[in-house]
Image (cartoon, rainbow, N blue to C red):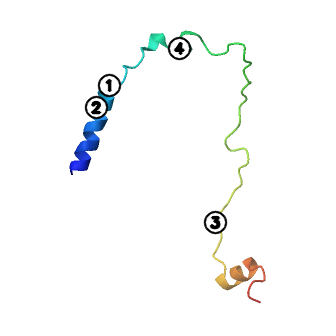
Amino acid sequence: MKHILTLGGLGVLLAACSAPPAELTQISTLQSPARNTQSIQSVSYDPVIRDYQDYTPTDPQSWKKSNKEQNSGWGQ
């Protein structure tokens, strides 16, 4: 417990000794816009259902037949 309080007190002491943060008006990157000579890539419409495939439900198959079709020769 003593170690936790010591580390916590050390953190508070170091935070009190640090410099205050700069104001936003003093940051040079906020005073000028980003490169405004950069070209902008055109945007085109991309349909959501472009590659749609209909997957209608089918009747269940025999699981033995399905396993044999998916088996790649392993265990034979």
Q: Quadrant of the C terminus?
A: bottom right
| Real-space Cα separation, disc 3 to disc 1, in angstroms | 69 Å
Residue 30: assigned label: 4
Q: Which of 61 and 74 is in front in this view?
A: 74
- The quadrant in which residue 24 appears is top left
Tell me the residue at 65%/82% (across/down): 63
In front: 38, or 49? 38
Residues packed near mark 1 inside 10 Å, few (<14), some (14 to 19) or many (20 plus) = few
Q: Which amino acid does label 2 sit on?
A: Leu
Q: Nearer the viewer, residue 15 or 28?
A: 15
Which residue occupies the extreme bottom position in the image?
Answer: 76
Crowding at mark 2 (Cα within 10 Å: few <14, some 14-19, many 20+): few
Q: Residue 57 carries which label?
A: 3
From what the image shows, is residue 46 above or below residue 35?
Answer: below
Give neighbour class at mark 4: few <14, some 14-19, many 20+ (Cα, 10 Å): few
The residue identified by callout 2 is 13
- 3 or 1: tag closer to the N-terminus: 1
Q: How many marks?
A: 4
- Residue kind at label 3, given as amino acid type: Pro
Labels 2 and 1 touching (C-beta < 8 A)? yes
Q: How far apart are marks 3 and 4 (CA)?
A: 57 Å
Residue at 70 percent of width and 79 percent of height: 66
Residue at left offset 42%, top offset 16%: 22
- Binning the other alpha carbons within 10 Å of mark 3 as few (below 14), some (14 to 19) or many (20 upward) gives few
Q: In which quarter of the image is residue 16?
A: top left
Q: Find residue 42 and report its horizontal and vertical position in percent.
A: 74, 24
Front of the two marks 4 and 1: 1
Mark 3 or 1: the one toward you: 1
